[in-house]
Image (cartoon, rainbow, N blue to C red):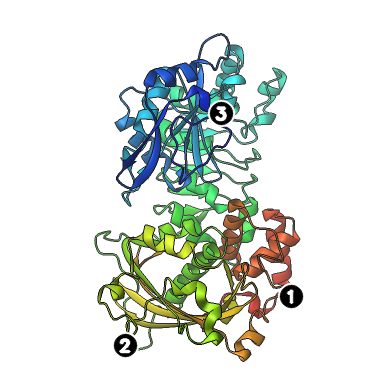
Amino acid sequence: MGDVQEDPQVRHTPYSTWRYKKRVKRQNEGHIHITVWRDRKALRREMGENTQDGTPGSWFKITIPYGRKYDKTWLMNSIQSHCSVPFTPVDFHYVRNQARFFVQDVGTASTLKDVSYKICDEENRKISIFVNPSTAPYSVRYKLEPEEMEQLKLTMNKRYDVSQQALDLQSLRFDPDLVGHDIDMILNRRNCMAATLQIIEENYPELLSLNLSNNKLYGLDGLSDIIQMVPTVKILNLSKNELNLVWELNKMKGLDLEELWLEGNPLCDTFPDQPTYISAIKDCFPKLLHLDGQELSPPVIIDNDTPCLIKPCKESYKGSDALKSLVLQFLQQYYLIYDSGDRQGLLDAYHDEACFSLAIPFNAEDPALSSLCEYFKESRNMKKPKEPSLCVQPLKHTKRDIVGSLCVLPKTQHDLSSFLVDMWFQTEKMLCFSVNGVFKEVEGTSQGSVRAFTRTFIVTPAGSSSLCIVNDELFVRDATPTETQSAFSNQEPTLTSSSMPTRSQEQQEMVHAFSTQSGMKLEWSQKCLQDNEWNYTRAGQVFTMLKNEGKIPEEAFKQIT
């Protein structure tokens, strides 16, 4: 399990086989104490110990931590451009937050190891790459035999329309020609999808339309290879499959689709209305003209150099509902991560050069305020310090310093129903708003203590549907008796870290996706998922049924006062 390269701030591998490794600690810009291999020969010896069929080091697993946030095409092209030898990634897929694929040959693996920390993303963050000896990937271990490939090719030829450059693979598993030869083509299996795409690439390189309906697809990792193999596809039919989550479609973003069919998938039933459904799909495929047979409005071309929010209007403040929705989504995302126990995920919310400050009404001589002592070392009060430098020192600059500061603050759970949001300044390129509310501390000496807070955000656009924080000011005080009594009173049940298991990253993503699609608050979305044992499809069906029957209270849905 020993990693070829390891950043202890990112990953800890307590079971590494230390006696085989010589390591040296060095300090690089942006990464402190990065452990690297001193001798490439040591790497080859370690890798050479892994054997499959007598050939030393046949296969290697390549892992990119936090790789899920990167587009597959961009990531692979970036790695290849820095790699001194060409390589073919096998079985590329995402596992939780990681991107993962396999390569063959120790030389290729060693070269990929050298690429680690040489690639920077859009935020100038260095990308690490881990290389480990591995068994052969699934698609290789269960690769179709030559005679099976030939039969599959003949079957697909019968289903290809030359005039339309269209391939109809619906219900492929039950094709009589395949069943008669005892070939079980289950496209969820990597080997089956890889074989299918290989035949498409070799025989239909100009394919325009692909029909994969009725194949029980629940994931699109394998199909995503079509982006590189046959990028000409404009029409894709994925109807009547088992796709539960809209973010599966993010894996297909590299295709410039003009027509898409999704009807009959569970994910379609999780949206509160048709406009929300269309909006979510168009976020993945901006050039889409038809969805489920319905003609869509043509895409609006926006100049990326001049991002805008919503222009203020002197008349009736047109567009305010859209702006409210944008701010609400931002706050729910932000506090979902803030209260999760791991605030490192907030790095993406801040600009590289953002600024943060915290203030409390703390007086060391007043015992009544001593409960806020954990906030004191981060607090900045311009009236108190006598030295000018002490006014600047508590300011946190750069997003890494900010998130580092947030991570040492007490763990919390915010009462989203208590939030009062005031949007008080707005231009095309900037939005300022304040949030007032209450939260409780969920561990430590002050566990259960209710605090009140005011937070002021200055944000700029970061795409069509997200915001980036450039300035963040937080004021924390003890809640009044009235605030304490009413805190969390509108939530049934109260969802606290102490009364429920900590959510995994995947569950957090499910909660956020369910909240976005259903229009419900995060706590209600989580309750619905929990009540249905985290079965996203069943939770969506229950939500739709209860909503149609009018049994979901109004307070369950998102609001901004």
Horizontal side of 312 relative to 195 (left or right) equals: left
Q: Is residue 284 above or below residue 420?
A: above
Mark toward the start of the polypeptide (2 vs 3) = 3
Q: Which amino acid, by three-letter code, is at mark 1?
A: Lys
Crowd class of label 3 (few under 14; some 14 to 19; many from 20; radius 10 Å): some
| Residue on which disc 2 sits | 314
Mark toward the start of the polypeptide (3 vs 1) = 3
Q: Residue at x 25, y 64 (%)?
A: 306
Q: Residue at x 58, y 30 (%)?
A: 190
Crowd class of label 2 (few under 14; some 14 to 19; many from 20; radius 10 Å): few
Q: Residue at x 72, y 66 (%)?
A: 499
- Name the spot of residue 187 as percent of width and height, x first: 61, 32
Q: Rounded to the nearest whole Å, what is the CA distance between mark 3 and mark 1?
A: 47 Å
Q: Do we see residue 442 in this rendering?
A: yes
- Name the spot of residue 536 as percent of width and height, x first: 67, 55
Give the quadrant of residue 298.
bottom left
Q: Which amino acid, by three-letter code, is at mark 3?
A: Arg
Q: Quadrant of the N terminus?
A: top right
Q: Nearer the viewer, residue 445 or 242?
A: 445
Q: Rounded to the nearest whole Å, what is the CA distance between mark 1 and mark 2?
A: 39 Å
Q: Secondary structure at mark 3?
A: loop
| Residue on which disc 1 sits | 551
| Residue on which disc 3 sits | 159
Crowd class of label 1 (few under 14; some 14 to 19; many from 20; radius 10 Å): few
